[in-house]
């Protein structure tokens, strides 16, 4: 069974459910959407960051490279310029020298001082070669060792000012000098002190021929410059680059002018080149060697070995170096010292060098990266904030939902109450109707289906009312019919004579009977009645069918049978009278029988005084006779067809004699055809067995029937009683008369009469009755004695509680005293005849007088009530 | 009254007693017991014997128990005979039994029946 939940609750639940679902759904969708959005934005931001970074990178890159290049170019130019200056100086010196050689007259003699020991002042200093020194030994007018100043020297001494000047004016020039073929060397520099070897008196020798620059410069045409490689300054020991130019005199190299530029200077120029933070520069010479580098370590460091970068294992670097050396300017992005770097190079054409600037890519793109990071960080922050916002939103959602729930509950309850109130009212009204108040009319006007329902209920109620009325009528009718059937059943039951308490004063027989219909009213019946004092009629019958039709036919049959028996037997007692009676009964039943019903019947008349039983069995079960010794036998004479079967059927009567103690058992086929659960039939044998079992004559009909009933009940236990069951048992106790036989003559009249009186007194019959009866007996006996001519007479006396019966039997001439007409009483005494009074008195004073002539005997029976 | 039946010797003789009292032409007969087929002839004899010159015949039935048709016949005969000789027969002292018989047979109207309370 479904749990009972009010509509209110259902509505509320529904609302809550739907709204929750909506909320949850919306919430989920929103949150999901938000997260998606967040992701998008984060992604977007990231992408933005990325793109921005990339763009920035690119921009920066470009910028950086540009800058690098710029710087490189600038520096290259700078250096070149510097060197150009040097070059110019050198050419200037060479030119001056040239001029001096060509026009010595223009110039005075000038001596060049020797280097001052320990001095670090800028001064022109004279040095000479060993060869010159050897010469000098010969013509020395100076101190020992100092060679004699030649004219060449003296004249060339004019150049010292230029040398000094040049040196002083250029920080590039570490020393300016000129070296002659003749072995003279005039140098202007700051390191005079380094010109002396320890305690040597004389300065160091200067071998120009040993000098690369000298040698190289000697090979170039005038006005041309050579740059040396990085060489060690002979004096300072520092690396320097010499720029030299030959001085030709008379088509031959007379001297070489040069200027040494300490690499320091170049170093500085290089080292001072910083690009950004990590950027540095290096100089590459025409041999691909790093001359100066901002790095002291790494692939581009300036090292002793001076590797050719072009031969570097770093392919990118090598390639770049190639280009550098070939005088290209450009840039590259390579990996250097394990780091991504941008490389820009610009050639120093005149020197055949390349100025290279390097900067870490990272540094370059650092801002971009920083930007990106910042964007990312921002993005993260934003994402976090978004997360936070989403969480907040979720929280608010939850709170809102909770609030909404509460609200819903209220609203829902309220609303659903409003909704369900009419329904509840309806339910209430319907309950009233249900409670029995069919006049109640529902009044609901909510303008919706509830109202329709109310109206429908009203219509229904009206209809129910009419149905109820109708039904009440029908039920009353049915009740009536049922009652009538019950009444009919009772009537029918009552119709059948009760065996208990009846005929209790009749000592000749005992009766017991019972009938149980299968269905309310039945078709079986039995009947017993006294036709007269001496004749007991017994009937048992079974109408075909069951129920009311059978019952009705049963009534008809019974009435007919009883009527016929009562009427006819009284009047006629002829040969085969039973056959005739039954035939007439049959014809009568056939006449009125349109429904083809029939009835089996056993009809018999028992003469009580003799025990003679005359009967006709019309298609009925065989009666069972239990003899006084207990033996049982079935009566086998078949009388004929069932009654009401066909008209003008013959019937055969049977005549048997019951002895004192015999019992006749009549029954219907409801007994023999009683069916057990196992579908067995009860049968005649079982019946006989039960009766035998009962015992002998001491067992009363009542007990026998009860025993039989019990057995049948037992037999058909559980199964339905299929047919009406009827039983009738009659035990015959003899005529009940106390008899006196004798010869009827006048002498014995007194005896007979006295016998009668005696019997009566014995039975405590009241005196008045005795007198009456005695008188009657007197008359009858007198008649017999005087008129019958009988040789034997039997007088029987039967005194019962309420009745005295006398039976007079004689074998005389047939004489029915009842035939004698009554004497005319109104006649006067004279007219009165004498005879006939006796019988008249008997007739008048006895309650019942019957006569029959049977078996050659007159029989007269007198009955007198006590 | 009839309840207390007195049994006397007469019963043995058929149960009837006859007491006659003759006074000249009047006779009173008291009959007791039963007047039936057996005993009736005796009464008849008695009556017949005394019929001569009788003017008044009184039958006292107060002791009579019952009467049968035979008795009735005798009575009727006696009544007729008295009437013939201009005499009167009166019956008196009849009990219920006798009365009933007389009523049934119509003898009540025929005979002169004296009621008990009429007796002087």
Image (cartoon, helix red, strand yellow):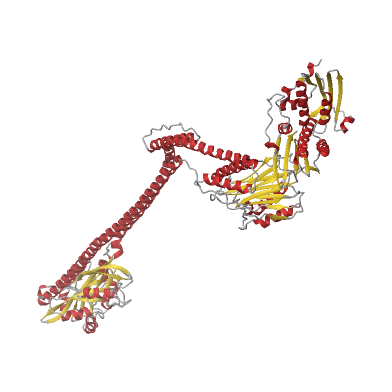
Q: Position of residue A247 (x, y in %)?
A: 14, 77
Horizontal side of residue A183 vs A399, given as left or right: left
Q: Is residue A310 visible?
A: yes
Drawn side of residue A398 relative to residue A778, left or right: left
Above or below for A560 versus B101: below
Q: Which residue is found at the position 33% from the left and 53% from the top?
A: A37
A541 left or right, relative to A160: right
Residue extending furthest toward the top: B120
A841 shown above or below A51: above
Q: Quadrant of the C terminus of chain A?
A: top right
Q: Nearer the viewer, residue B31 or A168?
A: B31
The residue under the point 77% across, 49% down is A698
Q: Is residue A602 visible?
A: no
Q: Nearer the viewer, residue B6 or A225?
A: B6
Q: Nearer the viewer, residue A474 or A587?
A: A587
Residue A67, x across and y down, in percent = 23, 63
Residue A835 occupies quadrant: top right
Left or right, A6 with reference to B34? left
């Amino acid at each position: 069974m479904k749990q009972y939940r009010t509509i209110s609750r259902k509505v509320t639940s529904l609302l809550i459910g739907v709204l929750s679902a909506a909320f949850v759904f919306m919430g989920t969708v929103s949150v999901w959407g938000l997260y998606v959005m967040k992701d998008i934005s984060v992604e977007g931001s990231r992408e933005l960051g990325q793109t921005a970074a990339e763009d920035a990178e690119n921009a920066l890159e470009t910028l950086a490279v540009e800058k690098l290049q710029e710087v490189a170019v600038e520096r290259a130019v700078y250096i070149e310029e510097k060197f150009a200056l040097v070059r110019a100086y050198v050419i200037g010196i060479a030119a001056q020298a040239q001029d001096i050689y060509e026009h010595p007259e223009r110039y005075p003699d000038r001596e060049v001082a020797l280097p001052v020991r320990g001095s670090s002042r800028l001064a022109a200093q004279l040095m000479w070669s060993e060869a010159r020194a050897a010469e000098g030994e010969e013509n020395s007018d100076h101190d020992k060792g100092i060679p004699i100043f030649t004219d060449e020297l003296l004249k060339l001494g004019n150049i010292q000012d230029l040398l000094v000047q040049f040196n002083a004016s250029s920080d590039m020039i570490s020393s300016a000098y000129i070296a002659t073929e003749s072995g003279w060397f005039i140098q202007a520099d700051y390191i005079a002190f380094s010109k002396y070897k320890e305690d040597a008196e004389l300065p160091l020798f200067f071998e120009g021929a040993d000098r690369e620059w000298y040698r190289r410069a000697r090979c170039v045409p005038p006005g041309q410059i050579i740059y040396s490689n990085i060489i060690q300054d002979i004096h300072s020991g520092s690396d320097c680059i010499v720029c030299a130019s030959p001085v030709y005199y008379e088509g031959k190299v007379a001297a070489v002018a040069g200027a040494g530029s300490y690499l320091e200077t170049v170093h500085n120029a290089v080292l001072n080149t910083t690009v950004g933070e990590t950027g540095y520069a290096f100089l590459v010479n025409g041999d691909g060697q790093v001359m100066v580098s901002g790095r002291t370590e790494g692939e581009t460091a300036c090292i002793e070995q001076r590797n050719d970068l072009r031969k570097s294992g770093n392919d990118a670097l090598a390639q770049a170096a190639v280009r550098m050396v070939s005088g290209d300017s450009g840039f590259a992005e390579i990996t250097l010292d394990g780091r991504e770097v941008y490389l820009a190079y610009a050639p120093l054409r005149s020197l055949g060098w390349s100025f290279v600037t390097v900067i870490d890519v990272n540094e370059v793109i650092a801002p971009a990266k920083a930007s990106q990071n910042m964007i990312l960080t921002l993005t993260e922050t934003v994402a976090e904030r978004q997360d936070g916002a989403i969480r907040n939103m979720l929280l608010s959602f939850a709170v809102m939902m909770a609030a909404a729930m509460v609200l819903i509950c209220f609203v829902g309850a309220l609303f659903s109450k409003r909704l369900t109130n009419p329904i509840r009212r309806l339910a209430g009204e319907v309950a009233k109707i249900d409670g029995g108040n069919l006049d109640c009319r529902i009044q609901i006007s909510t303008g919706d289906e509830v109202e329709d329902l109310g109206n429908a209920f009203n219509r229904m109620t009206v209809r129910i009312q009419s149905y109820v009325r109708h039904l009440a009528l029908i039920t009353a009718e049915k009740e009536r019919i049922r009652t009538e059937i019950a009444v009919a059943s009772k009537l029918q039951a009552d119709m059948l004579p009760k065996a208990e308490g009846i005929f209790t004063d009749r000592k000749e027989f005992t009766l017991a009977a019972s009938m149980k219909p299968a269905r309310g009213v039945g078709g079986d019946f039995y009947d017993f009645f006294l036709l007269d004092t001496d004749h007991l009629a017994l009937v048992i019958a079974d109408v075909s069918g069951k129920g009311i039709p059978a019952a009705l036919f049963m009534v008809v049959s019974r009435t007919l049978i009883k009527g016929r028996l009562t009427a006819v037997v009284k009047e006629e007692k002829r040969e085969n009278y039973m056959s005739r009676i039954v035939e007439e009964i049959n014809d009568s039943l056939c006449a009125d029988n349109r429904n083809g019903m029939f009835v089996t019947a056993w009809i018999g008349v028992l003469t009580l005084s003799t025990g003679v039983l005359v009967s006709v069995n019309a298609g009925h079960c065989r009666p069972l006779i239990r003899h006084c010794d207990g033996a049982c036998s079935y009566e086998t004479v078949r009388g004929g067809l069932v009654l009401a079967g066909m008209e003008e059927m013959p019937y055969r009567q049977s005549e048997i004699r019951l002895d004192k103690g015999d019992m006749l058992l009549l029954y219907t086929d409801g007994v023999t055809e009683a069916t057990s659960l196992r579908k067995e039939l009860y049968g005649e044998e079982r019946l006989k067995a039960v009766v035998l079992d009962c015992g002998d004559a001491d067992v009363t009909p009542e007990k026998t029937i009860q025993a039989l009933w019990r057995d049948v009940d037992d037999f058909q236990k559980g199964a339905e009683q299929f047919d009406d069951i009827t039983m009738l048992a009659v035990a015959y106790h003899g005529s009940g008369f106390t008899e006196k036989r004798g010869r009827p003559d006048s002498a014995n009249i007194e005896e007979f009469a006295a016998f009668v009186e005696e019997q009566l007194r014995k039975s405590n019959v009241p005196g008045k009755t005795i007198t009456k009866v005695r008188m009657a007996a007197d008359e009858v006996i007198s008649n017999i004695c005087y008129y019958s001519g009988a040789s034997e007479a039997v007088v029987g006396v039967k005194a019962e509680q309420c009745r005295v019966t006398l039976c007079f039997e004689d074998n005389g001439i047939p004489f029915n005293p009842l035939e004698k007409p009554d004497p005319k009483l109104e006649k006067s005494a004279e007219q009165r005849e004498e005879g006939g009074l006796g019988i008249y008195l008997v007739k008048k004073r006895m309650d019942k007088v019957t006569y029959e002539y049977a078996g050659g005997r007159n029989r007269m029976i007198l009955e007198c009530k006590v | 009254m009839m309840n207390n039946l007195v049994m006397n010797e007469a019963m043995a003789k058929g149960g009837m007693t006859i007491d006659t009292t003759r006074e000249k032409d009047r006779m009173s007969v008291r009959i007791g017991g039963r007047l039936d087929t057996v005993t009736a002839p005796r009464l008849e004899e008695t009556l017949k014997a005394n019929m001569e010159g009788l003017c008044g015949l009184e039958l006292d039935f107060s002791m009579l128990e019952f009467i049968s048709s035979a008795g009735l016949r005798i009575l009727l005969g006696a009544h007729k005979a008295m009437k013939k000789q201009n005499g009167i027969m009166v019956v008196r002292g009849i009990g219920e039994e006798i009365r009933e018989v007389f009523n049934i047979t119509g003898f009540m109207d025929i005979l002169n029946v004296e009621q008990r309370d009429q007796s002087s």
